[in-house]
Amino acid sequence: MAPSSAPRVAVIGAGMAGVSCAAQLQQCGIAVTLFEKSRGLGGRLATRRNEAGVAFDHGAQYITAHTPAFAQYLERLREAGSAAVWQPRRAATRDAAHPWQVGTPGMSALLKPLAATLDLRTQHTVDALRRDGDGWQLCCDGIELEQRYAAVVSTAPAPQTRALLAIEPLLQQALDEVRMAPCWALMLCLREPLPVDIDAQRHDRGAIAWLARQASRPGHAPAAQAWVVHASPEWSTEHRELSADAAAHALQRELVQALGMPLPAVSFAQAHRWRYALTTRALGQPFLASTDGSLLAGGDWCLGPRVECAWQSGVAIAGALAQRLLR
């Protein structure tokens, strides 16, 4: 724990970038409060259960390590039982050189060891910042918090970060260059097995971009006939404003067309829209910072659409802040 006299930092967003940043800051002796608008941590490293208890990893599907530092992080997670290698039946892909790894029993487990000792405030939506001398005060759900922070870090998606940092025009100009696409995800339970010889498949054309059998994932119930289907960025953008029910029906029709066969009887179908799911044009640097270094922003939108990119951004922000606050 950081001493009471330590500088305090607010980190907004408890996905990979936010949690890795907050954990690194705390290790440096800086007091951190981590704010998350949802009920739990993870962001797109998400797992949802239906009423029958069937689990769906409906956000990020797997992670890969392209750098030694992130590979070491994943190794520690595997040793702790929070991650495992996923080896689904699949056609050859461009990721073949990098093992697919997943959180166990769900994707958010990739963050829980880092977040175990953090001051995490869930269901807190930070909607405004106010300069207070050489620090900052936050408004959550319209209520100004008493705590004053030496620095604020936003790891929300670029469009949401842009709205929050409206007080910094230079940061907004950089954020305007980032592009993120939505993704409709379909969670599907079938009464009979789907007669295909794959557990995971990426589609390069058409409305369906990805499908994965959940029972093939470590930590998931092996008997469940549960699948996660992701729509393509193009389809998701075109149908961005569909209701969840309409999207679920439409994606089932698209899946039938993509597979070239009818689906077995469906016992459960639910769609979820990830409004900012995929970075299509990255910032090109690990993070953004205001002129005085007290406002920072980062996430996978900085370096690319992989979970590792979010981790790299969070760690880089923490390093820059520690250098500034502890000098």
Image: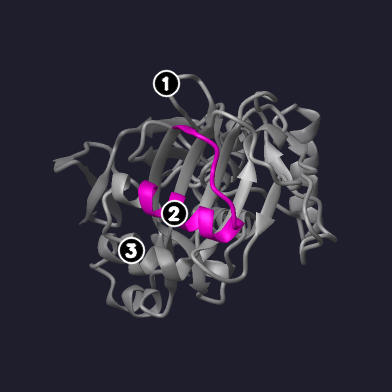
246 above or below 173? above
Q: Given this view, does label 2 or label 3 mark the residue nearer the observer?
A: 2
Q: Amino acid at mark 2?
A: Arg
Q: CA distance from mark 3 to mark 1?
A: 27 Å
Q: Earlier in the sequence, mark 1 or mark 2?
A: 1
Check disc 3 and report the residue beneath it: 239
Q: Given this view, does label 1 or label 2 mark the residue nearer the observer?
A: 2
Q: Amino acid at mark 3?
A: His
Q: Would residue 175 be visible to someone looking at this image?
A: yes
Q: How many labels, in total?
A: 3
Q: Position of residue 139 (x, y in %)?
A: 20, 45
Look at the numbered disc 1 and give the secondary structure of its residue: loop
Q: CA distance from mark 2 to mark 3?
A: 14 Å
Q: Residue furthest left?
A: 142
Check disc 1 and report the residue beneath it: 51
Q: Which residues are magenta?
A: 248-267
Of residues 12 and 111, which is closer to you in this image?
111
Q: Earlier in the sequence, mark 2 or mark 3?
A: 3
Q: Earlier in the sequence, mark 3 or mark 1?
A: 1
Q: Quadrant of the C terminus?
A: bottom right
Of residues 17 and 275, which is closer to you in this image?
275
The label number, if any, that marks residue 253 in the structure image: 2
Q: Amino acid at mark 1?
A: Glu
The picture quadrant where one finds residue 51 is top left
Residue 256 among those drawn in magenta = yes
Q: Main secondary structure of the magenta part?
A: helix
Q: Position of residue 280 (x, y in %)?
A: 51, 73
Look at the numbered disc 2 and give the secondary structure of its residue: helix
Residue 163 among those drawn in magenta = no
Q: CA distance from mark 1 to mark 2?
A: 24 Å
75 above or below 252? above
